[in-house]
């Protein structure tokens, strides 16, 4: 689980939520009540994971943080890039939402927050497959918001730009990190979106890239 995922778990735990963290490999995630290992890029993995989650009790919210980044242009990028980016960015959210929606409906309502990207609405050269996969997450968010409205399930997405993580600090020039947003600040936005205070908000695509 990456820096944003860990920050989300910590923030939600701090606010009194019981958090189940799901990842592809076993890991100690501070703040998580329980961790599960599952491949969320496939239906069977998501269904198995959320079957376990549902057996633990009521499910109030889903936060789709799983994702990845691969550079490359449309013309010169790796042949596998589009498939990889769609799998880790779109399909993880698609299958997780499908598996979690009945649990949220059974609860009587709830919230889903997807993590998209600024690149989805303002793409730049060099990250074509990534931008396309994150743009698909935006459409998924809007469609689900409409589909799940009768069940009182709210669906929103945040659009981070550069996140101030240790990995980005090592890989990027200081000038690119000047306006980077800390993972904890993004986690606070997500915590608000799943809270009762955000009940009127659904189908929103929320920029979370500060002044950059």
Image (tube, grey):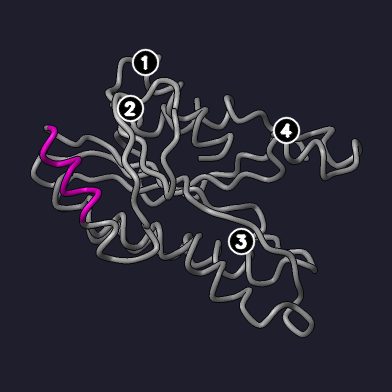
Q: In this view, does 139 lie above or below 20?
A: below
Number of the front mark, 1 or 3: 1
Chain-order first, disc 1 or disc 4: 1
How many badges with numbers are in the image? 4
The residues tagged by marks 4 and 3 sit, at their Cα atoms, a distance apart of: 23 Å
Tell me where residue 194 appears, x and y as whole percent: 34, 33
Chain-order first, disc 1 or disc 3: 1
- Could you tell me which residue is drawn at 34 percent across and 64 percent down? 143
- Residue occupied by mark 3: 120
Q: Which quadrant of the view contains residue 72? A: bottom right
Do callouts 1 and 2 mark residues in contact (Cβ within 8 Å)?
yes
- Residue occupied by mark 2: 195
Chain-order first, disc 1 or disc 2: 1
Residue in the foreground of this view, choosing between 150 and 52: 52
Task: Give the magenta range.
Answer: 48-56
**Looking at the magenta stretch, what is its main secondary structure?**
helix
Residue 157 visible to the viewer: yes
Disc 2 crowd, CA 10 A, few/some/many (<14, 14-19, 20+): some
The residues tagged by marks 1 and 3 sit, at their Cα atoms, a distance apart of: 30 Å
Element type at mark 1: loop
- Could you tell me which residue is drawn at 44 percent across and 28 percent down? 29
Q: Which quadrant of the view contains residue 96? A: bottom left
């Amino acid at each position: 689980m990456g820096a944003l995922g860990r920050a989300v778990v910590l923030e939600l735990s701090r606010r009194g939520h019981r958090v189940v963290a799901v990842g592809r490999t076993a890991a100690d995630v501070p703040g998580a009540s329980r961790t599960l290992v599952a491949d969320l890029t496939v239906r069977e993995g998501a269904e198995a994971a959320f079957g376990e989650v549902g057996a633990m009790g009521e499910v109030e919210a889903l936060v789709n943080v799983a994702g990845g980044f691969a550079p490359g242009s449309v013309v010169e990028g790796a042949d596998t890039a589009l498939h990889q980016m769609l799998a880790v960015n779109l399909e993880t959210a698609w299958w997780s939402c499908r598996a979690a929606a009945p649990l949220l409906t059974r609860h009587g309502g709830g919230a889903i927050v997807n993590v998209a990207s600024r690149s989805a609405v303002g793409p730049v050269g060099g990250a074509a497959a990534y931008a396309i996969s994150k743009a698909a997450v935006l459409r998924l968010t809007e469609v689900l918001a409409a589909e799940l409205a009768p069940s009182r399930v709210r669906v929103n997405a945040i659009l981070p730009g550069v996140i101030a993580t240790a990995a980005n600090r090592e890989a990027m020039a200081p000038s690119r990190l000047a306006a980077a947003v800390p993972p904890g600040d993004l986690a606070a936005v997500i915590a608000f979106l799943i809270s009762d205070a955000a009940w009127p908000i659904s189908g929103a695509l929320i920029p979370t890239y500060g002044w950059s």
